[in-house]
Amino acid sequence: MTSQALKPNNCYQASLRFMMKHTGAGCVLVHGIVDALGNTGHAWVETSDRKTVLEVCRHPLIGQRREIPAAEYYRAVGAKNCQTFDLKAACEMVISTGLWGPWEPRL
């Protein structure tokens, strides 16, 4: 087992950091519950038109794919109870809570 395999997923931090780095992309941060992780919380980024998921965390949920059509992603991972945040709102949540996420119960 490699040290990479021993590290927990970093979805909340990685997703927001991606948005901060690519502010001109107009992305949306999404927090949701996914069946693929045993009905637990996960974070990902979507393009501003909400048509493409950008999976930027350490361990992508669909093989090694990083860009996935949103409808396919939602079906494949069983995403539900999703909340979206623009960059400003996400940064305000980090400042007010001291956490990269999740910011809502059960996310």
Image (spheres, helix red, strand yellow):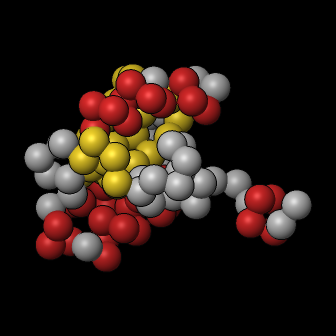
Residue 66 rendering spot, x and y as whole percentages: 42, 56
Residue at the limit of the structure toward the left, as seen here:
49
Q: Is residue 94 visible?
A: no
Q: In the figure, 89 relative to 79: above or below?
A: below
Q: Is residue 56 left or right of residue 88?
A: right
Q: Residue at image x 45%, y 24%? A: 78
Q: Is residue 6 left or right of residue 47?
A: right
Residue 12 rendering spot, x and y as whole percentages: 48, 53
Q: Which quadrant of the rendered structure holds the N terminus?
A: bottom right
Residue 91 rendering spot, x and y as whole percentages: 31, 61
Q: Is residue 74 visible?
A: yes
Q: Which residue occupies the foreground of this view, 13 or 46?
A: 46
Q: Which residue occupies the foreground of this view, 74 or 19?
A: 74
Residue 46 rendering spot, x and y as whole percentages: 26, 49
Q: Residue at image x 40%, y 68%? A: 17
Q: Residue at image x 81%, y 68%? A: 3
Q: In the figure, 68 relative to 20: above or below?
A: above
Q: Which residue occupies the foreground of this view, 62 or 57?
A: 62
Q: Is residue 85 left or right of residue 102?
A: left
